Amino acid sequence: MPTDSLPRVVLKPRRAAPFFNRHPWVFAGAVDRIEGSPEAGDIVDVHSSAGAFVARGLFNPASRIRVRLYAWQDGVSLDDDFWAERLREAIALRRKLFAGTPAERACRIVFSEGDGLSGVIIDRYGDYLTVQWTSRALAQRQAVFLEVLQEELQPKGIWLRTEKGIGEIEGLEIRDGLLSGEAPPRPLIVEEQGLSFAVDIVEGQKTGFFFDQRENRAAVARYASGANVLDTFCYTGGFGIAAAKLGGAARVTSVDSSAPALALAGRNAEMNGVQERMQFENANAFRKLEELKETQARFDLVILDPPKMARNQNGLEKALRGYFSLNRLAIDLLPPGGILATCSCSGLVTREDFEGMLQQTALQSKRRVQILEARLQAPDHPFTPACPETLYLKCYICRVL
């Protein structure tokens, strides 16, 4: 369709500012009217109420995000060449970041909005890739993505992972499965910071592993020398194994509610030669922390890395109460001078929110908390000021007195 005849999405008065500033999500509530008859996946132009061109994007009448924006210059064609170029830019960044290191073959290749490709996440696990679509409109262009991935990375196989509820959210009916090549081994092995991890990209959480905590795992390990460590929400053991192997922890107790994740964690401990110093418990982390408090257990280092606790604005207050409860329990397990490594992957929880929660925790526990390091997500998860939601991961390393 010629760009001068594209359908138009016209915004309500005084709703255009975020999109002029390059926020990529146009929610249905910002739309005044639609000129033309676009269908799901069609290219549309977004205009202000005064008629000014704002941006070009992809339309989805079934989604709360009615338009995802990709180009802010009039006349840019969102054709196959556009998507191919943007994908190659993302791949080139990872090559520059990790050239010649194990992370080049174990990283996030595309981080959705952070790479200007709102609606897709692509991870690399050695010779295999995972693709996760969160946009129906972008998923309709899957063929060009697969072609570029084959040309640039020559994977043995590409596996599709789906986000829970994506059919309801985006009207996108897809299932996990093989997109091309051969199915990945279960598990496969990736290297990180001199460590080896077994990963199940077919059934593991998200796409199988949390690359966003790569540098944070190594940072926390620096505080683990000779320590008795408690690693909650440990998943497949990333933080705890790093504490034992890289940091020299004397003992690590790792807790998670997922038996399959703990089975991989035990295998990972053996691969890294630290199984004698590690104990794994299949338990709810909240209840385990309460139990440890009742028995007056003490740890030199407590790690909190819970899953996302705020999925929408309505859940923010409840999430902050949950973070407060977790951190309050953790602080009671630390002697004076103990280390608390506490994380949040909830994008709706800002750094200010989280630091305020830590302050309230310190006041309630009558302890003094010093923030030694305030860390973010790894650089293969780039964030953009235009879309604050891309800055989601917070990792605070604190000394508790």
Image (spheres, rainbow, N blue to C red):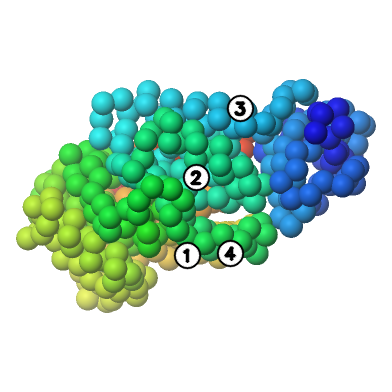
Question: Where is residue 29 drawn, in percent x and y?
Answer: 80, 52
Q: In this view, does 31 lie to the left or right of 393?
A: right
Whether the residues at callouts 4 and 3 have beta carbons within 8 Å, the answer is no
Say which element carries label 1.
Answer: helix
Q: Which of marks 3 and 1 is in front?
A: 3
Say which element carries label 4.
Answer: loop
For disc 4, the neighbor class at 10 Å (few under 14, some 14 to 19, many from 20) is few
- Compare marks 4 and 1 and give the one earlier in the sequence: 4
C-alpha span from label 4 to label 3: 31 Å
Q: Which of marks 4 and 1 is in front?
A: 4
Q: Give the residue at mark 3.
A: 81
- Compare marks 2 and 1 and give the one earlier in the sequence: 2
Q: Give the residue at mark 2.
A: 121
Say which element carries label 2.
Answer: strand
Q: Residue at x 58, y 51 (%)?
A: 134
For disc 1, the neighbor class at 10 Å (few under 14, some 14 to 19, many from 20) is some
Q: Which amino acid does label 4 sit on?
A: Gly
Q: Is residue 369 left or right of residue 301?
A: right
Relative height, residue 226 to residue 172 (above, below) = above
- Compare marks 4 and 3 and give the one earlier in the sequence: 3
Q: Quick one: 224 or 135, which is closer to the camera?
A: 135
Relative height, residue 141 to residue 197 (above, below) = above
Q: Which of marks 2 and 3 is in front?
A: 3
Whether the residues at callouts 4 and 2 have beta carbons within 8 Å, the answer is no
C-alpha span from label 2 to label 1: 28 Å
